[in-house]
Image: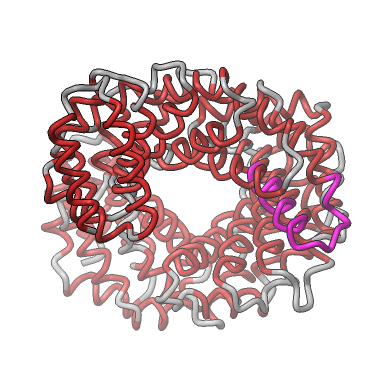
Amino acid sequence: MDNLSDTLEKLKLTGSDCASDKLDGCLDCLLQALGQNNVESSEKILQSGILQVFASLLNSQSSCTAKIAHIIAEIAKNEQLRIPCVDAGLIPPLVQLLNCKDQEVLLQTGRALGNICYDSHSLQAQLINMGVIPTLVKLLGVHSQNTPLTEMCLVAFGNLAELESSKEQFASTNVADELVKLFKKQTEHEKKEMIFEVLAPLAENDAIKLQLVEAGLVECLLDIVHQTVNSEKEDDIAELKTASDLMVLLLLGDESMQKLFEGGKGSVFQRVLSWLPSHNHQLQLAGALAIANFARNDGNCIHMVDNGIVQKLIDLLDRHVEDGNVTVQHAALSALRNLAIPVVNKAKMLSAGVAEEVLKFLKSEMPPVQFKLLGTLRMLIDAQAEAAEQLGKNTKLVERLVEWCEAKDHAGVMGESNRLLSALIRHSKSKDVIRTIVESGGIKHLVTMATSEHVIMQNEALVALGLIAALELQTAECELESAKLVQVLHRLLSDERSAPEIKYNSMVLICAVMGSEPLHKEVQSLAFLDVVSKLRSHENKTVAQQASLTEQKLTVQS
């Protein structure tokens, strides 16, 4: 180690004289010391103050530049020495060196910058601001035959792509073309994996999604799926998963998705359809998720339903009813839910047996599956009176909904159960449905739903409760009383923050429940007249008119 101290002293003396023959030997000596004991040697280098000398040497480039960058790369492997490298002013000259032609200098410079900025978002952001992304993309294109240099660029992209601020810069380069070009040349699993690790974070950006699609990435991904689908090798299974996951990610962008759909005639869309009947769970999952993504606008949904997609999804779900794959169940139900959104699809999907298929999963204990199942049924019965009545009279379904309305650990499932309970009444307007819900103990949940923080849910609850009061008041009387409906309505009308439609529907409901003696008594005991008379001057005309009508009714019946 004394040898190292001597070397550092010499370096200080010759550092300013770049042409010195001694410099080269000193640098070799440093590299050798770092190779033998990196931590101890790095500490000595730091204490010697030589880092500042390196900064000036880098600025004046020489035949030793690659070795200096190499030494900095080795030193910066030590976490505690990264900030001293920054403080010594090494980053600006290193960034400048990315513009040189010498491939060894480029490689060691890239390594040095990568190690200094490793795991530091603020330093990586500094590099982005200094414009390294376009420079690195250019390097990848120019030096694509140089494997170490290519890998250095990929590692840098992988680190920088994690920062949101990088995406815009990447999108303004031809990184998509370069990466796809590079990907097509690869045969080894590890090399493909490296490129995948860069593609995944970049593909989160919609503009880059489209660029990757236009650069032909999808065709590469489909080839990988084709080559690996029947393989049992671990690498192939991993590659299949990565390729199909990335494919689904590309479909999350509206433009990239529409480009690949091509009016339902696109070869990519057709290939994805063939994944659904596959025996490979990963492909089934990717296929169902892809369909769910294609089903993000009405035109695509209508086209797919008209061309038989529903039966394919039903067949897929059927294979996963008993001890099925939860992720596949969730994905297939997501696809059906999206497909059920356009009005013209609902009746077609109902007659294809979607509701019956979905009900097979009622026994599922998995909240994500429960959530999608509820959403699918709610979409299907929208304005479909017959289906709403049929499902609303299904005691098993209604009892399960009431149970899920209490799933406090799963807010999504709880909310969707309440909404479906309300929807069954609103769309069926059926006395039988109301009786089934009353007998199953669902009324208290609708009253609680009327106090939700979401106006849309409050409103759906109040409309359903209004129908109950209009059609089956005597049957529901006890439940409405014990759920404290009248007090809830008083609170909603008194609260200045209540939306106009909430105030309106609350008053309609007050008028309706006065046909019940115990509820009427509660209304009289709660000074509703004061609250309602104030609403006659409400800025919303419909609310003001309903307030006048309600006031008259309250006065006549008091």
Asked if residue 97 is among those painted magenta in the image, a careful observer would answer no
Viewer-side residue, 382 vs 522: 382
Viewer-side residue, 525 vs 278: 278
Residue under the image location 56 percent in, 32 percent down: 150
Residue under the image location 79 percent in, 35 percent down: 269
Which quadrant of the structure image shows residue 295?
top right
Q: Is residue 247 placed above or below 422 in the rendered structure?
A: above
The scheme the figure's colours follow is secondary structure
Image quarter hosting the N terminus: bottom left
Asked if residue 233 is among those painted magenta in the image, a careful observer would answer yes
Viewer-side residue, 456 vs 87: 87
Left or right: residue 189 versus residue 545 is right
Residue under the image location 30 percent in, 26 percent down: 21
Residue under the image location 63 percent in, 37 percent down: 251
Tell how many labels. Answer: 0
Residue 78 lies, in percent from the top left, at: 29, 55
Does residue 386 appear in this view? no
Residue 260 lies, in percent from the top left, at: 72, 28
Residue 485 lies, in percent from the top left, at: 32, 72
Viewer-side residue, 285 vs 176: 176
Does residue 217 appear in this view? yes
What secondary structure is the magenta-colored segment mainly?
Answer: helix
Residue 172 lies, in percent from the top left, at: 45, 18
Left or right: residue 45 versus residue 314 is left
Residues rendered magenta in the picture: 226-246
